[in-house]
Amino acid sequence: MKELLPVNQNVILDISDTETEQKTASGIIIPDSAKEKPKFAKVVAISNIENVEIAVGDTVYYKEFSGTETEFEGKKYLIIPYADILAKAVETETI
């Protein structure tokens, strides 16, 4: 079994579940190049980084136009620099 392991302070995000075909109300299919892509993704791997603030399994918000998209064993991934992660989605309790 092969596995992607990030190096040089990079993070691998799973973006395979964000790809869905979209249509307008009149039935016109919107191409991928015209879609606004979501900027939230799940962390699947982190390189060896000191004082890391995220963990595998976290959902993070990242910079637009960041990283390199790749397909590996049927799934789509985004490899981005750790510095391009802007926020982490967390559950909070209501008061």
Image: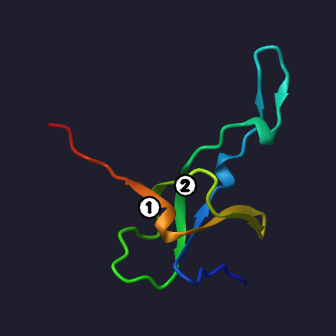
The spot of residue 52 in percent (x, y) is 37, 75
Cα separation, mark 1 vs mark 2, equals 8 Å
Where is the C terminus found, in terms of image quarters? top left
Q: Amino acid at mark 1?
A: Asp
The image shows residue 2, relative to residue 62, as above or below, that is: below
Q: Which residue is mark 2?
A: 41
Residue beneath the point at 65% across and 50% down: 17
Disc 1 marks which residue?
Answer: 58
Mark 1 / mark 2, whichever is N-terminal: 2
Residue 58 drawn at (x, y percent): 44, 61
Q: Secondary structure at mark 1?
A: loop
Question: Residue 16: x percent and y percent?
Answer: 68, 55
Which of the 4 quarters of the picture holds residue 36? top right
Identity of the residue drawn at 21% across and 44% down? 93
Quick check: 24 above or below 71? above
> 56 left or right of 52?
right
Look at the picture and state if 1 lies above or below 11: below
Where residue 81 sits, quadrant-wise, is: bottom right
Q: Where is residue 2 drawn, in percent x and y?
A: 72, 83
